[in-house]
Image: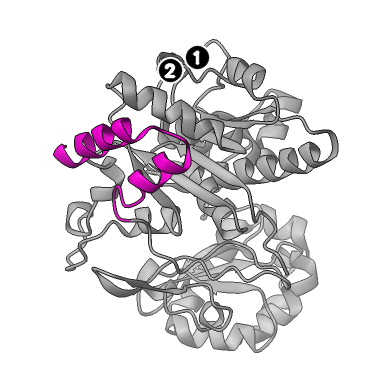
Amino acid sequence: MTAPLQGIRVVELASFVAAPAAGALLGDLGAEVIKVEVPWGEIYRHSTARMMGVDADFDLSAPFQMTNHGKRSLTLDLALPQAQEALRKVVDTADVLLTNMLPGRIARYGLEAESLLVEKPELIIARLSGYGADGPEADTPAFDYTAYWARSGLMEQLREEGGALSFQRPGIGDHSAGMALALAIVSALRTRDQDGHGQIIDVALQNIGYYISGNDMTWALATGESPPKHDRTHPRNPLWNHYACRDGRSIFLVMIEADRYWKTFVEAIGHPELDDDSRFKDAFARYHNAPALVALLDGIFQGKALAEWIQQLESHRLICAPVRTHSEAAEDETAAARGVFPEVNHPEQGSFRTVGPPFSMSRHSMPGNAPAPTLGADTEAVLRESGVDEETVALLVAASSRD
């Protein structure tokens, strides 16, 4: 079968994570993705393991490899008028322009969305921003840490009652935004197939934060009140809580329909007598007596190691999970069986595993195991393909090499 996006050319004028993550997904679907970088390479490309505090001899940026696999690399020094003109020629060959540049900067390069659509009505322009590409904060710089995490309410909500603020890990909001961008772009391509017209797509990190936290955000919108934070010592449902085990590891119970699981649960943990305790007879009683039940369960779970509890509860088909580290999660047997972590054969680094695409298709292979391009590897070829004259090609290649 032909790849879903075979024949589609995407020009990616973006750095860091969200927009490039969308570009990678489009590439997984068969599009040709041309990544435009500064001649010295964006900073994300150079974030090695030791720079991130990981004691390992891995000289590439593993996250950069994930979000840029399978692309072509075009390096341009956009301070040069010739480079700006060449970039416009490259964009003129594209089906999609994918960017996270702020409006003021994109205007300096003559790539305003409205003007591009006048010149090329079939072009799809996908813009990633912090707070909206044409809103009151269109030119406000942002990361997912600010727009998605802090301002959306997630940072405050995702801490236990009385606990310290949680610090978002890199790229969480960005990867969510990347999926939204990719979905919107594929939808716009479908529309273009029908009527021949392109359009402008906007994804704001702030909006993604509201959407991801939609369960809580809708309550805040409907009631004017923030939902209460989780308090593990007095949860609304003690069977939807985490408990420390004998070995210092934690188990997370997620039995949302608590009455359905209560009798099986108390038998599984070896305390069937709790089913006869009037304090815990139903979900309402367990909520009102939650501190007492949590204290009991804390003591019970201290009696065995995490692996023993997981085996014991899962044998009764109770819903739970071990609280794992990332290095442990990387060895998950179910994930391995499903090919979640494909192996990349990199010409410089050798073999290493990465995170594959978040979905699969029965009629289109999506291995996600191509390496990210070497910086500037395709500059000369892309410029020639886009009709840039030989003298300018030579100038821009030399400028990139010099930097």
Q: Kindly tell me whether residue 269 is visible in this rendering.
A: no
Which residue in the protein does label 2 denote?
Answer: 140
In which quadrant will I find the N terminus?
Answer: bottom right
- Asked whether residue 225 is in view, the answer is yes
Seen at 68% across and 53% down, the residue is: 288
Q: Quadrant of residue 109?
A: top left
Residue 234 located left or right of residue 41? right
Say if the magenta span includes residue 395. yes
Could you say whether the residue bearing mark 2 is in a helix, strand or loop? loop
Q: Quadrant of the C terminus?
A: top left
Query: Whole-percent x and y of residue 191?
Result: 80, 38
The residue positioned farthest toward the front in the image shown: 390
- Residue that carries the numbered disc 1 in the rendered image: 137
**What amino acid is at disc 2?**
Thr
Side of 386 relative to 235 (left or right): left
Residue nearest the observer in this picture, 80 or 45? 80
* Residue type pointed to by label 1: Glu
Q: Secondary structure at mark 1?
A: loop
From the viewer's perspective, tell me whether residue 25 is left or right of residue 211. Answer: left
Q: Which residues are magenta?
A: 374-403
| Tag 1 and tag 2, C-beta contact below 8 Å | yes
Q: Is residue 140 above or below residue 88?
A: above
Local packing at callout 1 (Cα closer than 10 Å; few below 14, some 14-19, many 20+) is few
